[in-house]
């Protein structure tokens, strides 16, 4: 297991973590400059943040600083109430792949979606099996496109508390079932050792509770472990979406989980992704980034 | 699958649902009278509510009305920070078994506990494997006692969002793994058809999201399906603990899940268990009970 205590070379900042500074939405350009100034070598930006500054601007800035993208957030949201909705999602996901390629991202992270309308509080149906079928079909179609573009797709299983509205893939086991169905491991020994075209993003916040986590991390193996995200689970958690904790402030045994992931050969960035409306988004960006660096060294 | 549309003979009221009337804590005696008045045939009371009125008083009242107890809430909370804490939990759980016997409950529901101190926001450690071992050992000890008392124990897997503080058993699969380890199915065909001494309480709120739910319900079979609880998952859910929905107001396909449970031969009560600080606890108890009856017929 890598020693993180001496530096932060393997820290990546998911830009949602510093989406706001003192409660005000911050431009991605400023976020990137502040990361580069701290010798942070990688980020994982969100599409809306990129779009707000312009893809070309961000692409130039990322390259100027030699920044890597540990991932691009995010594709997915496949289910829809009708054929037009499904087609729109397909088109939008292809654009996400194109953008991820332009930015040189390591993978496109997929938050797969669930019951149509549920995010707006008005689910049009309750059929999780249907949503899951639409997700599988959506990933299958996107995978063809992404393979040609050589952009790996990383399914991110979300915590079961998001099953209704954000993602109907809720365990690592379930995500890997989809990976194996749509992108079977090649029998050829050489290709079988390469990174998979379809893998997973393991975010400790979503999976830490799972009694099968270790076994499923082993099942994923280096090939399918495309991204590793960290934050912490607070007790109490006062908001289902925006009350994630800074690494070390909660109950997740992050080093233990990182140990499992690295035992498979994962050697990429650890991406700090903290949605925190009541705390970190209210602070100065500099403080948040400095804290991420410090906690990366002491608590990850 | 039973037809619930014509009457509410299979409705049980978990008394947490009407714990408050117009925001004021209600005595269990009043709750029981109001249930009996509506020909509700079963309840599932909480220990604190029973204790507040006195066990003998409640026992007499339950018998006077011929009420059944679909379960007794609850034993569990096995993990502790030290030997004294573990011993205290063991003693308290034996008292819970005794009370359940006195009240003639169908089973004692187990909310197993998790990281010591987490409920108070101060987890003393982050070792889920340790907590899970303490839970297994705690159930094993209690099972010996409960078997002599002929009181079935029902492990209730709680939603993963409660993994830190309330229960480290978070899927039906995990609960059944514990059941099979501690109380293997007898090889004798006659005894193998009887109700198990250790089984599960399936609450749709906790398990509805699980892609393996149907398969695990089948695995449980009639022997281990000791209780079935209903409410609904609201979108958005604004509080992790006390924002459950009335059956029909959320996204859970309750009849589908009930169909899976009844396909195994389950023919017991459907227990309405709705923690709802912002809504139902603010209303008049009569309205809540009448709504439970109506939704039991239309949405369960």
Image: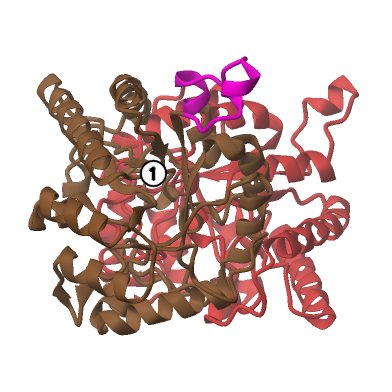
Chain colours: A red, B brown
Q: Nearer the viewer, residue B64 or B267?
A: B64
Q: Nearer the viewer, residue B276 or A242?
A: B276
Q: Is residue B2 above or below residue B144?
A: below
Q: Could you say whether the residue bearing mark 1 is in a helix, strand or loop? A: loop
* Quadrant location, the C terminus of chain B: bottom right
Q: Is residue A255 above or below residue B300?
A: above
Instruction: Tell me what residue is drawn at x 28 percent, y 22 percent.
Output: B145
Rendered image quadrant of residue B166: top left
Queried whether the magenta region covers residue B128, the answer comes back as: no
| Residue B272 percent coordinates (x, y) | 41, 64
- Within 10 Å of disc 1 (Cα), the crowding (few <14, some 14-19, many 20+) is many
Q: Which residues are magenta?
A: B178-196
Rendered image quadrant of residue B187: top right
Question: Label 1, on which residue?
Answer: B106
Q: Nearer the viewer, residue A256 or B144?
A: B144
| Residue A179 percent coordinates (x, y) | 76, 43
């Amino acid at each position: 297991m890598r020693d993180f205590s001496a530096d932060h070379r393997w820290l990546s900042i998911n830009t949602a973590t510093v989406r706001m500074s003192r409660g005000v939405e911050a431009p991605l350009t400023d976020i990137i400059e502040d990361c580069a100034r701290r010798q942070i070598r990688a980020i994982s930006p969100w599409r809306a943040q990129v779009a707000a500054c312009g893809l070309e601007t961000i692409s130039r800035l990322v390259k100027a600083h030699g920044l890597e993208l540990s991932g691009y957030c995010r594709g997915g949201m496949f289910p829809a109430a009708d054929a037009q909705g499904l087609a729109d999602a397909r088109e939008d996901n292809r654009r996400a792949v194109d953008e991820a390629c332009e930015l040189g991202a390591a993978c496109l992270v997929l938050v797969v979606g669930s019951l149509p309308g549920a995010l707006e509080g008005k689910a049009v149906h309750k059929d999780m099996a249907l949503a899951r079928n639409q997700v599988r079909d959506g990933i299958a179609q996107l995978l063809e496109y992404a393979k040609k573009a050589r952009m790996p797709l990383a399914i991110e299983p979300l915590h079961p508390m998001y099953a209704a509205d954000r993602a109907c893939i809720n365990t690592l086991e379930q995500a890997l079932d989809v990976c194996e169905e749509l992108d079977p491991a090649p029998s050829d020994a050489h290709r079988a050792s390469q990174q998979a075209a379809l893998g997973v993003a393991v975010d400790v916040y979503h999976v830490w509770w799972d009694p099968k986590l270790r076994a499923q991390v082993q099942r994923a193996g280096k090939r399918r472990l495309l991204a590793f995200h960290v934050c912490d689970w607070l007790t109490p958690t006062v908001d289902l979406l925006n009350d994630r904790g800074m690494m070390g402030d909660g109950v997740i045994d992050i080093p233990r989980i990182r140990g499992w992931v690295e035992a498979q050969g994962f050697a990429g960035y650890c991406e700090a992704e903290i949605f925190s409306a009541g705390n970190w988004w209210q602070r100065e960006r500099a403080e948040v980034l400095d804290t991420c660096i410090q906690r990366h060294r002491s608590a990850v």
